[in-house]
Image: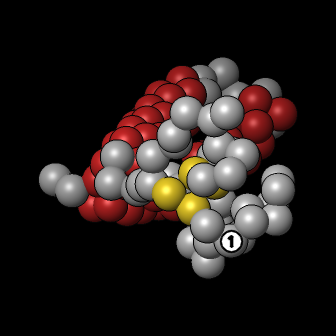
């Protein structure tokens, strides 16, 4: 799967299980407040929806991390040819020393 698809599936799981978790949690609280003897089925249902939320969260974080790794390697950073500051803008203007020339790799500075 592509990283964007992993992220999308994770968000889908998270968005589908969030309302179920809140509804089941509310029903469990109602069951416990009404002093019924057996509320175990609500605990199990809340645990299952909690696992679904956790799975969606893990997929979302993993997909976003994988996207960040894939996109960070192809980006070239610009360096100022005068002061060597990294991150000069693509227009070529250095914000450290106000020069217009930039280079892709830093040269040794004098």
Position of 102 with respect to 37 (left or right) is left
Position of 50 with respect to 71 (left or right) is right
Q: Is residue 13 visible?
A: no
Position of 17 with respect to 36 (left or right) is left
Residue 13, by quadrant, is bottom left
Residue 85 placement (x, y as % from top left): 69, 45
Residue 76 placement (x, y as % from top left): 42, 55
Q: What residue occupies the far left of the structure in this picture?
A: 1
- In the image shown, does 70 or 51 lie closer to the viewer? 70
Q: What residue occupies the far front of the structure in this picture?
A: 110
Residue found at x 57% / y 62%: 102
Residue 54 placement (x, y as % from top left): 48, 35
Q: Is residue 39 visible?
A: yes
- In the image shown, does 90 or 57 lie closer to the viewer? 90
Circle 1: is it few (<14), some (14-19), or many (20+) Cα within 10 Å? Answer: some
Residue found at x 21% / y 56%: 2
Residue found at x 55% / y 33%: 108
Residue position for label 1? 100
SS at mark 1? loop
Residue 60 placement (x, y as % from top left): 44, 47
Residue found at x 56% / y 28%: 43
């Amino acid at each position: 799967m592509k990283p964007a698809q992993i992220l999308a599936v994770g968000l889908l799981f998270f968005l589908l299980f969030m309302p179920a978790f809140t509804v089941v949690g509310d029903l469990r609280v109602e069951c416990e407040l009404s002093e019924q003897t057996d509320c175990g089925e609500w605990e199990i249902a809340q645990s299952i929806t909690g696992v679904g939320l956790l799975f969606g969260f893990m997929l979302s974080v993993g997909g976003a991390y994988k996207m960040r790794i894939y996109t960070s390697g192809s980006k070239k950073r610009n360096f100022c040819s005068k002061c060597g500051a990294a991150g000069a803008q693509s227009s070529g203007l250095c914000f450290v020393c106000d020069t217009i020339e930039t280079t892709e790799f830093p040269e040794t500075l004098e």
